[in-house]
Amino acid sequence: MKTCLDCQKSFEISEEDFSRYEKLQVPEPARCVECRRKLRLAHWPYGIWQKRKCDATGESIISTYSSEARFPVYKREYWFSDKWDASVAEIDWGKSFFDQLFELQSKTPHFHQQGKQNENCDYADDVWECRNCYMSRSMAGCEDLSYCYRVLYCKSSLDLTYCYYTEQSYECTYCFKCYDVRFSFDCKE
C-alpha cells in the first residue's frame, strides 16, 4: 500500500505490477490512478467538456467550448443544416485587417462537436463511427472506451493513447494489435 502524493488516499500496487516496474526499471507510481489521469489531462484543453446551450436553438449540448466563448456555438446538426445563413462580410480597407478578422471570428458560429455516426459519445470530441465512448478525443471505429486519445479501432479499454486495434487493455501508449495488456508502452501484437 502507498499513499498518493496528491490526494493522500491509499492505493495498492500489486506484486505483479511491482515486478513489472522492476523488470522495466521504472519507478513505482507515487500517485493513485485517478491523480495520474488528472496529471496526464491537465495540459490538454480538449479534456474539458461542459454542458451549455446551443446559441441557435437553446438546446442543451455538451461541448469543449464554454458558454463564455467569444463566438456562437451551434449544435452540430443545426450548424450543417440550411436553417441559418452565414453572414457576408465586406473588407473595409480603411480598418486594420486583424481587427476585422477578430470581429468576423467573434460572430462566426462553431459546431459543438467534431465527428459523425456516433452512438452514446456525448462526452467525446473528434470521434468518428464510435459507440459508448466517454471523455475521449480523436478516434475512429472505437467502442466502449474511456479516457482515450488518438486511438483507432480499439474496444473495451481505458486510458489508451496512440493505440490501434487494441482490446481489453488499460493505460497503454503506442500499443498496436494488442489484447489484454496493462501499463504498456510501445507494444505490438
Image: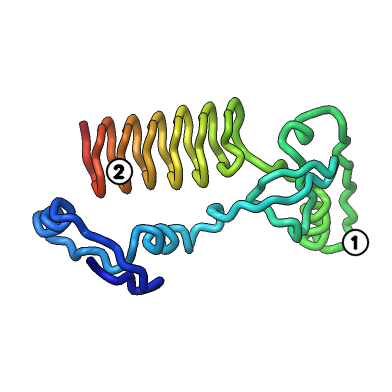
Q: Label 1 to label 2, Cα distance in Å?
A: 52 Å
Q: Under tag 1, what secondary structure?
A: loop
Name the residue tied to disc 2: 174
**Against 14, is 180 above or below?**
above
User: Horizontal and vertical percent for residue 151?
Assistant: 41, 38
Q: Please name the amino acid that badge 2 sits on.
A: Tyr
Instruction: Name the front one of labels 1 and 2.
Output: 2
Residue 43 tag number: none
Q: Under tag 2, what secondary structure?
A: strand
Assign the C terminus to one quadrant of the image.
Answer: top left
Assign the N terminus to one quadrant of the image.
Answer: bottom left
Which picture quadrant has residue 75? top right
Name the residue tied to disc 1: 94
Q: Earlier in the sequence, mark 1 or mark 2?
A: 1
Which picture quadrant has residue 177? top left
Instruction: Give whichever of 133, 81 is nearer the camera.
Output: 133
Relative to 188, 44 lies left or right: right
